[in-house]
Image (tube, grey):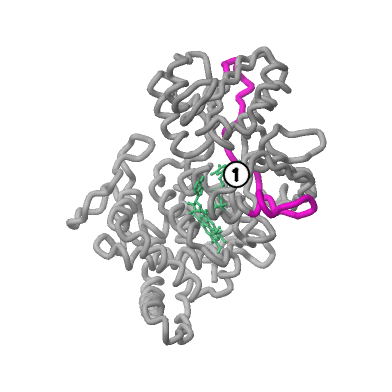
């Protein structure tokens, strides 16, 4: 099957995206030349194997998926031709009695493009049945491409909607190429660790379209399908290009041997690993970790120290109830165990081009990247005021307060304030954002937030409310946060 490859133009809205996602091919010599614009139709898909008799519902789903796939394959060649010939209409497609899109205004503030308009209508219709569409998408993907199942974790309950949701998120931001490209490039680089290859993208795209057309039938028509084809092609191309570029300079993953494991509280451990090759990152960033006990289950963890001369990497991990990876890292991992690490990510890094102060909010293990930021400022040797508010529910949960107070004693530009929301304390009592507001305003400060998603959301709202412009507020990735459990 043909697949998108590295593109010459690459951009999400370049003419290249009009080719349809099946059209660019990866030639055997890897030169990146593209195949003819309209590919031949796929052969009919093989019938799925007979299901076990006890699983009728699943059998029914699978049969439907198969039938749908057959119809889809027959229609596809025609759609591809239309996608290829499609010229962007000057006006959005005529209203056919569909519900309005949930968010008709794109991030740029301009009117949505016709494609974005069509995508959003699909999404509005899909929203109430998103779970079913996701299940159908994966059922179809694994029936049609059994070899792809091995790339995913055995149990996908908590995580399985992330791929699907990201596709939808990308579609939502179709009119904001800068944000979209940055997001998708990171995603494409991160996919190298899963073993994703360019030829996998068309398979995923076909199943996505099949799920969309099935679960958003009222808004689905050929023009809509062509819009999704163009968008998915563009998304894939950005991810593939970013992965290919990354391949020239970085491994797909690193191995890291645990060299130290320190239990700070019954459920928080500081884990230090030695990567098998140099691991470049910036203070404030995070990575993904896979443990030997849960293959292909990756979770995000922030670096708790700025890059060190010995190359060691440290993480603060809190074991959440029934948490797979965090539980293993806190209660099972020991020196000598080997983890896998994905590439670094995250934009919560210090802007060294300004002398603004740093206002830092760290909740729970969110203090880990804040500590790394403090070390980074110290290493740069410029005396910028750094105000850290370190929040936890109970005083006993402030597991790293001694380290932070030691840093405060060492640097007269640093101030650390513990904040406890529940129970007795000799420090400040209340919710972190409210306390920070009391100490404001913060006119000459850039803000950095890390911790549970709820704390970050209310923290950002508070800081914007007291006049810190949003471009001077940095925090862990929102997409990742929305997908991840609280910490
Ligand atoms: C950018 C980013 C950086 C992160 N950095 C860190 C870090 O430095 N240290 C750290 O410890 N974590 C961090 N996390 C959270 C981490 O990625 C995992 O989500 C967390 O460790 C739980 O993973 P798990 O596999 O153990 O739990 P899962 O198996 O994913 O979840 C098990 C169950 O526990 C629930 N659950 C999850 N968290 C909690 C909680 N806090 N309280 C109660 N129930 C919960 C889940 O909803 C689920 O039902 C970060 C997350 C992001 C997005
Ligand atoms: C446009 C295409 C795609 C998008 C937008 C996308 C998006 C995502 C996202 C957001 C995640 C969650 C974890 C992360 O951030 O890395 C993810 C995970 C994953 N993706 Fe993709 N993906 C795409 C294509 C593919 C393809 C073609 C494959 C190969 C089969 C693939 C395989 C995986 C795997 C194996 C995971 C891990 C799943 C898990 O942890 O449960 N993805 N994808």
Q: Position of residue 304 (x, y in %)?
A: 67, 36
| 111 displayed left or right of 453 | left
Residue located 36% across and 63% down the image:
212
Q: Which residues are magenta?
A: 328-357
Q: Residue 15 magenta-drawn?
A: no
Q: Quadrant of residue 229?
A: bottom left
Dot 1 beta carbon under 8 Å from ligand 1: yes
Q: Check the image and report above or below for 269 versus 73.
A: above
Q: Check the image and report above or below for 157 versus 248.
A: below
| 12 displayed left or right of 196 | left
Q: Which residue is mark 1?
A: 318
Where disc 1 sits, the SS reads strand
Residue located 35% across and 49% down the image:
116
Q: Position of residue 333 (x, y in %)?
A: 71, 53
Q: Position of residue 392 (x, y in %)?
A: 53, 32
| Residue sitting nearer the eye, 23 or 413 | 413
Determine the main secondary structure of the stretch shown in magenta.
loop
């Amino acid at each position: 099957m043909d697949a998108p490859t590295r593109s010459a133009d690459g951009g999400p809205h370049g003419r290249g995206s009009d080719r349809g996602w099946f059209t660019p091919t990866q030639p055997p010599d890897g030169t990146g030349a593209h195949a003819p614009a309209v590919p031949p139709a796929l052969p009919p898909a093989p019938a799925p194997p007979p299901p076990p008799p006890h699983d009728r519902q699943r059998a029914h789903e699978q049969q439907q998926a198969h039938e749908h796939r057959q119809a889809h394959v027959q229609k596809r060649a025609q759609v591809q031709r239309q996608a290829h010939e499609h010229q962007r209409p000057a006006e959005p497609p005529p209203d056919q009695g569909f519900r309005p899109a949930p968010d008709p205004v794109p991030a740029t503030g301009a009117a949505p493009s016709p494609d974005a308009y069509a995508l959003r209508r699909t999404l509005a219709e899909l929203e109430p049945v998103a779970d079913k569409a996701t299940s159908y998408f994966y059922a179809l993907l694994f029936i049609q491409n059994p070899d792809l199942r091995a790339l995913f974790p055995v149990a996908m309950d908590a995580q399985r909607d992330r791929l699907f949701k990201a596709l939808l998120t990308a579609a939502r931001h179709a009119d904001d190429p800068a944000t979209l490209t940055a997001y998708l490039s990171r995603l494409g680089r991160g996919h190298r660790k899963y073993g994703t290859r360019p030829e996998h993208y068309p398979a995923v795209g076909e199943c996505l379209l099949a799920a969309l057309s099935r679960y958003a039938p009222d808004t689905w028509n050929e023009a809509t399908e062509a819009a999704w084809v163009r968008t998915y092609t563009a998304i894939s191309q950005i991810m593939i290009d970013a992965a290919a570029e990354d391949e020239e300079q970085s491994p797909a993953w690193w191995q890291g041997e645990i060299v130290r494991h320190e239990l700070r509280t019954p459920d928080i451990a500081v884990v230090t690993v030695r990567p098998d090759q140099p691991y470049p990152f910036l203070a404030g960033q995070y990575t993904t970790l896979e443990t030997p006990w849960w293959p292909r289950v990756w979770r995000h963890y922030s670096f708790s120290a700025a890059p060190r001369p010995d190359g060691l990497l440290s993480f603060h991990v809190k074991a959440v109830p029934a948490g797979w990876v965090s539980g293993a890292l806190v209660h099972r991992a020991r020196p000598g165990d080997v983890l896998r690490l994905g590439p670094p990510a995250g934009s919560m890094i210090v802007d060294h081009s300004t002398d603004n102060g740093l206002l830092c909010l760290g909740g729970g293990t969110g203090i880990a990247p804040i500590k790394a930021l403090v070390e980074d400022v110290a290493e740069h040797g410029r005396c910028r005021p750094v105000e850290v508010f370190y929040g936890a529910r109970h005083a006993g949960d402030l597991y790293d307060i001694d380290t932070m107070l030691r840093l405060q004693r060492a640097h007269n530009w640093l101030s650390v304030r513990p904040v406890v929301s529940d129970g007795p304390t000799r420090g400040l009592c209340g919710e972190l954002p409210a306390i920070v507001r009391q100490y404001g305003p913060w006119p000459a400060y850039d803000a950095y937030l890390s911790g549970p998603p709820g704390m970050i959301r209310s923290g950002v709202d508070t800081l914007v409310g007291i006049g810190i412009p949003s471009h001077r507020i940095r925090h862990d990735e929102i997409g990742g946060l929305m997908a991840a459990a609280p910490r």
